[in-house]
Image (tube, grey):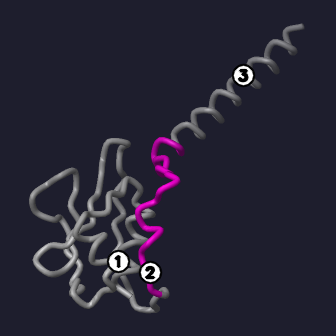
């Protein structure tokens, strides 16, 4: 009988540890926001480049928002409504298609760093 209790206790501990790991992975990676009217559906992404690109490796909480928009003729990445970008992409906005210029003028809001890195790579290539 004592052996059964020990086995049961070990099983419960393993389940709790597994749930804690799954929860922490979801919390760390963040949950991408999906919407039926994704703002980038009308953009014209370019093919991936073999050249290196800048990547943002920071983790975000659910309230963190990046805004990719035109800044002084090129692309600025703003964090949580800051007035100055924390990163600038040296791509001349006037050289982009009209649809992209319009998106960048309005600002592209992103909450997921993977999505942000994808947008940056599209515009840098």
- Indicate the secondary structure of the residue bearing disc 2: loop
User: What residue is drawn where x is 48% and y is 86%?
Assistant: 48
Q: Earlier in the sequence, mark 1 or mark 3?
A: 3
The first of marks 2 and 3 along the sequence is: 3
- Looking at this view, is 72 or 21 the one in front? 72
Q: Are marks 2 and 3 in contact (CB under 8 Å)?
A: no
Which residue is situated farthest in the top direction here? 1
Q: Residue 9, how many percent across, how many down?
A: 74, 18
Count up the numbered dots: 3
Answer few, some or many: residues within 10 Å of disc 2's Cα (few below 14, many 20 plus, some between 14 and 19): some
For image coordinates 32% across by 57% down, the residue present is 109
**Residue that badge 3 annotates:** 12
Few, some or many residues within 10 Å of mark 1 (<14, 14–19, 20+): few
Q: Nearer the viewer, mark 2 or mark 1?
A: 1
Q: Is residue 57 left or right of residue 35?
A: left
Identify the mark nearer the N-term, 2 or 1. 2
Between marks 2 and 1, how big is the CA–CA gap?
11 Å
Within the magenta stretch, is there residue 37? Answer: yes
Q: Is residue 92 left or right of residue 49?
A: left
Q: Which residue is mark 2?
A: 45
Look at the image and give the residue range highlighted in magenta. 25-46
Mark 1 lies on a secondary structure that is helix
Which quarter shows the C terminus? Answer: bottom left
Q: Quadrant of residue 52?
A: bottom left
Q: Which mark, residue 84?
A: none
């Amino acid at each position: 009988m004592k052996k059964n209790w020990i086995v049961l206790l070990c099983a419960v501990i393993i389940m709790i540890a597994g749930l804690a790991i799954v929860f922490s992975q979801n919390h760390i990676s963040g949950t991408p926001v999906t919407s039926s009217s994704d703002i980038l559906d009308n953009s014209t992404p370019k093919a991936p480049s073999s050249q290196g690109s800048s990547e943002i490796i920071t983790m975000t909480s659910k309230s963190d928002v990046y805004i990719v928009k035109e800044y002084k003729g090129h692309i600025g990445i703003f964090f949580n409504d800051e007035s100055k970008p924390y990163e600038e992409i040296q791509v001349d906005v006037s050289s982009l298609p009209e649809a992209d210029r319009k998106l960048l003028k309005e600002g592209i809001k992103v909450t997921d760093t993977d999505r942000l890195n994808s947008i940056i790579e599209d515009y840098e290539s």
